[in-house]
Amino acid sequence: MTSGRRILLIIAGGIAAYKSLELIRRLRERGIEVRAIVTTAGAEFVTPLSIASLTGERVFSDLFSLTDEAEIGHIELSRSADLIVVAPATADIMAKMAGGHANDLATTALLATDKPVLIAPAMNVRMWTHAATQRNLDILRQSNVSVVGPNEGDMACGEYGPGRMAEPEEILQAIEALLQAKPEPLLRGRKIIVTAGPTQEPIDPIRYIGNRSSGRQGYALAAAGQARGAECVLISGPTTLSAPLGVRVIKVTTAEEMRQAVERELPADIAIFAAAVADWKVANASSEKIKKTAATKVPSLLLQENPDILASIARHQRRPPLVVGFAAETENVVDNAKAKLARKGADLIIANDVSAKSAVMGGERNRVHVVSAKGVDSWVELSKAEVAVRLMELFAGMLQARRKAAE
């Protein structure tokens, strides 16, 4: 759907510029043409030769290049693309965009464009949280500039916090969402609750019980639902993913927090439980760090069962018309999913193999089995974004069929 589309990629000056090379490679794999502008500072981190080798195009940098202006020109550069992407978007270039500055080729092209713009911010945590940067961000959003990231994590400067540029795959998904023809609003007027990611159950203030879920499938579902006109609420355990465009995200940590958040969001038309919720929590969690000394015995953890969110919502007095659970299995995938469907009271179970050989947990692709009372529909392996689109179209069809039956 995006093959043959054109991107103008602006690479500003930040250590995250190295990720832009991987982004170019991913875009070219999908048949998307890429032209690049690199700022003077950006060229200190990635070379024009590297960029040109990946794009297959000349790299532009000089506003006053007689050759470039005669052959292409900054106006043509800014308008021949279907989308302009700034990655990394530094605090400096965001400030210039917000103020309407045009003192180099990058900012001139941005000011001269009539095409959509997507930025992927990347900077030190203190720069990101500074009032001036947040003010500039608000101005850009009000100007319909789309934003992906930043993520939270360790930084090259040695600090930790929000400011890491989104990963190439996240930027790619945002690009594809902006480039693709707007899907039919099959879910307009519907409210969808999606849970995603892992939960973390504390052992003490430092340690916790968790799992390897990345949250990618749940985030993709929320994005696909929002794109089809639904009001999507994403209730997310701890992940490093950026919020899908337009989706309201509620951050939680434990299973109990997730259950409470889901119940607060009822009523809804669809509830999708894609999160990998911990089955047990520590009943005797310590309020202080458990110390390890020569005299300390190995601590004994007393576990108790966590709330069964899927089963409780499937039997709730405000039960959504469509309740969907996920089953992450390592063996007997379909049989275990059938048993879970009967046990939980859901309408559908989306089952997948998360054994080590599958690379689904934390990966970018998935192969699911859609299990219902009518039988099992096993799909071929797809990207998680494609799985999400197909599932949302299935859910929309189910709701429409029920409405017609009721009439």
Image (cartoon, helix red, strand yellow):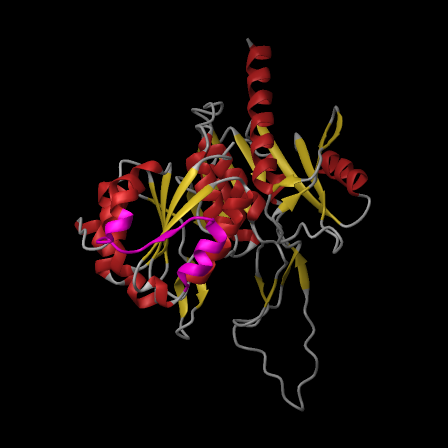
Question: Magenta segment, which residues?
Answer: 46-68
376 inside magenta stretch: no
Q: Nearer the viewer, residue 305 or 247?
A: 247
54 inside magenta stretch: yes
- The answer to whether residue 44 is seen in the rendering is yes
On screen, residue 3 versus residue 378, left or right, reads: left
Q: Position of residue 88 (x, y in %)?
A: 37, 57
Q: Residue at x 82, y 44 (%)?
A: 332
Q: Position of residue 349 (x, y in %)?
A: 68, 36
On screen, residue 190 versus residue 273, left or right, reads: left
Q: Nearer the viewer, residue 188 or 184?
A: 184
Q: Position of residue 224 (x, y in %)?
A: 50, 35
Relative to 243, residue 164 above or below: below
Q: Position of residue 310 (x, y in %)?
A: 62, 40
Q: Residue at x 61, y 41 (%)?
A: 383
- Residue closest to the far bottom: 294
- Residue closest to the far top: 407
Relative to 279, residue 302 above or below: below
Q: Quadrant of residue 290?
A: bottom right
Is the C terminus in the top left, top right, bottom left or bottom right quadrant? top right
Q: Nearer the viewer, residue 300 or 239?
A: 239
Q: Nearer the viewer, residue 66 or 109?
A: 66
On screen, residue 313 versus residue 303, left or right, reads: left
